[in-house]
Image: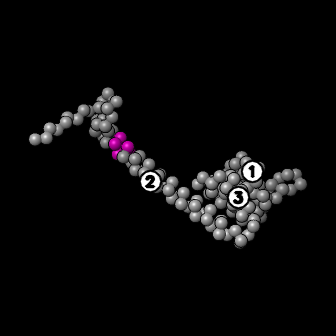
């Protein structure tokens, strides 16, 4: 089965504008055109769009993707190099996840803080607020 750009957009959620940009950058060298210049994607092309979208979402550059495509086209002799690329992507993604987990913890703290503020109608942490409640220093005996 062959799909148009609009059909690929509907199936993947990748905008037709982005697909055209990627096509212009050479990320889909195997997509065929008819005599009118309409591009048609095969099932394999659809799968590749999904992978390109995944790689782009985790920060793989267009140039790195082009290199990866070049290696894929060379066949099994480049499998080791492709494996190294994917392992590095995974490592980077795991580091990014750790950063995001830390951010989520900070956001959870703020959510708890504001929920408490809403319930108690007190602002105990923000010295810039006009409602800030100064804490008395305890004197050690």
Residue sitting at x 78%, y 58%? 29
Q: Is residue 16 at least partly visible in the picture? A: no
Mark 2: secondary structure: helix
Residue named by callout 3? 67
Asked if residue 22 lies left or right of residue 88, the reply is: right
Residue named by callout 1? 25
Residue sitting at x 60%, y 52%? 59
For label 1, the crowd category at 10 Å Cα-Cα, with few meaning under 14, some 14 to 19 and many 20 or more, is some
x and y, in percent, of residue 69 in the image: 72, 61
- Residue at the outermost left position: 141
Residue sitting at x 77%, y 49%? 24
In terms of sequence position, does the residue under pointer 1 or pointer 3 come before the other?
A: 1
The picture quadrant where one finds residue 12 is bottom right
Indicate the quadrant containing the C terminus: top left, top right, bottom left or bottom right: top left
Residue named by callout 2? 101
Q: Which residues are magenta?
A: 110-115
The picture quadrant where one finds residue 118 is top left
x and y, in percent, of residue 10 in the image: 68, 54
């Amino acid at each position: 089965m062959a799909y148009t750009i609009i059909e690929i957009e509907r199936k993947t959620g990748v905008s037709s504008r982005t697909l055209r940009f990627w096509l212009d950058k050479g990320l889909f060298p195997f997509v065929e055109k008819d005599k009118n210049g309409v591009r048609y994607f095969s099932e394999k092309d659809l799968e590749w769009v999904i992978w390109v979208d995944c790689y782009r979402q985790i920060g793989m550059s267009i140039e790195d993707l082009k290199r990866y495509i070049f290696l894929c086209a060379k066949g099994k002799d480049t499998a080791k190099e492709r494996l190294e690329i994917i392992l590095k992507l995974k490592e980077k993604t795991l580091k990014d996840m750790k950063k995001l987990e830390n951010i989520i913890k900070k956001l959870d703290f703020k959510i708890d803080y504001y929920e408490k503020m809403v319930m108690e109608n007190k602002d105990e942490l923000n010295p810039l607020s006009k409602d800030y409640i100064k804490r008395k220093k305890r004197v050690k005996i």
